[in-house]
Image (tube, rainbow, N blue to C red):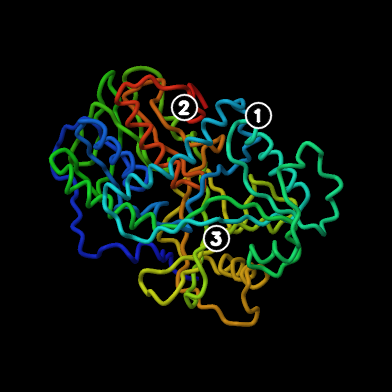
Amino acid sequence: MKENKSPWLTQLRKDRVHFKLDQDIKTDIAIMGAGIAGISTAFFLLKYTDKNVVVLEKNKLAHGSTGHNAGQVVSYFERGFASLVDSFGLELASRGQRDIEDAWNLLDEMYTDARLDINFSRFLGHAGLSSFDQVLLHLKNNFFRKRGGLDIERILISSEADFINEIPHEYQDLYTLAVHKNILELLETQDESFVAVLSYQKGCVNSALFCEEVLLYLIEKYGDRFHLYEKTLINKVVLKDDYAILDAETHTVEAKNIILCTNGFEGFHILNEGGLDIDTKFHHLVKGTIGYMSGYLEPMDKNPIAISYFTNPDATTDDPYFYLTRRNYEMDKNYNLISIGGPEIDIEDGRLYSRKNEFPDEMVKTIDDFVRSVYDKEPNKEIDYVYTWHGLMGYTRNGIRLIGPEPKNKTLLYNLGCNGVGILPSVYGGKRISEIFLKEKLEKTIFDVPESI
């Protein structure tokens, strides 16, 4: 058994001072959770409103899902675009997809304002498909993307695939035939079971380090109306008609609004004195998934990349898959860090998970088997997995992030739900929340919080 050791947290500053709440306070907005969702929400609120903002974190900045991911930045959902159209209609689905893709610009805005110089790579990333059904699914997604006015994803299909003549005629302009060897080269594999490759903009970043650097900027820029309190456990949230009281053990926080930017598995309770029960609803908004990842170093002789591999021909976008990120590792400039994830375990009760849990040997073996059989690696060469880590991800019931006010009491708002691909949705959610506080007339979105689950 190995320890839960994330490569991202090792890069954080060891000398940063942490402040715990040591008095009763009042503020305009209290944000619970200091991961990328909470820090992004604070950034856009502070920039675009005059509100006083307090961020409360029960552990330390970015030590949750934000510090325990594979570092991929992607603009897709963990469900196909065609399924979004089925659920929300073409117009709403297209607008939602466009909002997430526009979050690349929001990420740039945060980088520019905070004058960040940390490593952030962008490139054409890939996904390997291993069955006709998977190809059809993504062709259907492209079909609706084109109808919705979105850029289509590039799909290359092996000219040697035995299903070429079965592809529906309506999809003929949504893919290109390619030599099978070229597909394998893009996927950096010799596994000939991959029959197609899907390509679109991706990136990689240390989101924990990103949060820390943005935090330092916010303290410098807005120190008169921004505070972060870490190691501050909230036991209970009491919602009044027009304000909230947060019970932080020996102290309280009174806020005009509270924004939950958590993974949905915190052990606090929500008492809604203004009306209907919210506590039960909140604790059923998400289900938990523990993701397992391993990382090793290799010479820096390849460019950054992010690749997903659907190794199971029966898998869909709703099923687990392997994902790999390669990037220069700041801790040793002569090496690339290879981060691989894929194995998952679903849990219904977040109390069953602890970051202190060791990394199971069977998960190390599962990832190692993938590296040796799929990723372009010498099969008999020993690999030193210098990092093995796991993180608890909160998946909303429909796979779509929840952003906006709670209909039963609008004192409470959400920017909630990692859903496995949380960086861009978290950033978009922060901007959307700021627009809500500006009282702008906002159009309905696929991210709106439902009346009931």
What numbered label is drawn on residue 86? 1
SS class of the residue under badge 1? Answer: helix
Whole-number angstrom distance, CA of label 1 to CA of label 3: 29 Å
Q: Is 293 on the left or on the right of 439, as rendered?
A: right
Whole-number angstrom distance, CA of label 2 to CA of label 1: 17 Å
Using the image as rendered, state which of residue 375 and residue 108 is in the foreground.
108
- Determine which quarter of the picture holds residue 398: top right
Q: Residue at x 66, y 35 (%)?
A: 82
What numbered label is drawn on residue 341? 3
Q: Is 60 on the left or on the right of 182, as rendered?
A: left
What numbered label is drawn on residue 303? none
* Callouts 1 and 3 close, C-beta under 8 Å: no
Q: Residue at x 45, y 30 (%)?
A: 280
Where residue 264 sits: x, y (%)?
43, 40
SS class of the residue under badge 2? Answer: loop
Using the image as rendered, state which of residue 233 and residue 295 is in the foreground.
295
Q: Is residue 324 placed above or below 86 in the rendered structure?
A: below
* Other-residue count near label 1 (Cα within 10 Å), few / some / many at <14 / 14–19 / ≥20: few
Question: Which callout, 1 or 3, points at the residue further toward the start of the chain?
Answer: 1
Question: Which callout, 2 or 1, points at the residue further toward the start of the chain?
Answer: 1
The kind of residue tagged 3 is Gly
Where residue 315 sits: x, y (%)?
70, 50
Where residue 237 sits: x, y (%)?
30, 32
The kind of residue tagged 1 is Asp
Q: Residue at x 61, y 25 (%)?
A: 89
Whole-number angstrom distance, CA of label 3 to CA of label 2: 30 Å
Q: Is residue 439 placed above or below 263 in the rendered structure?
A: above
Question: Which callout, 3 or 2, points at the residue further toward the start of the chain?
Answer: 3
Residue pointed to by mark 2: 448
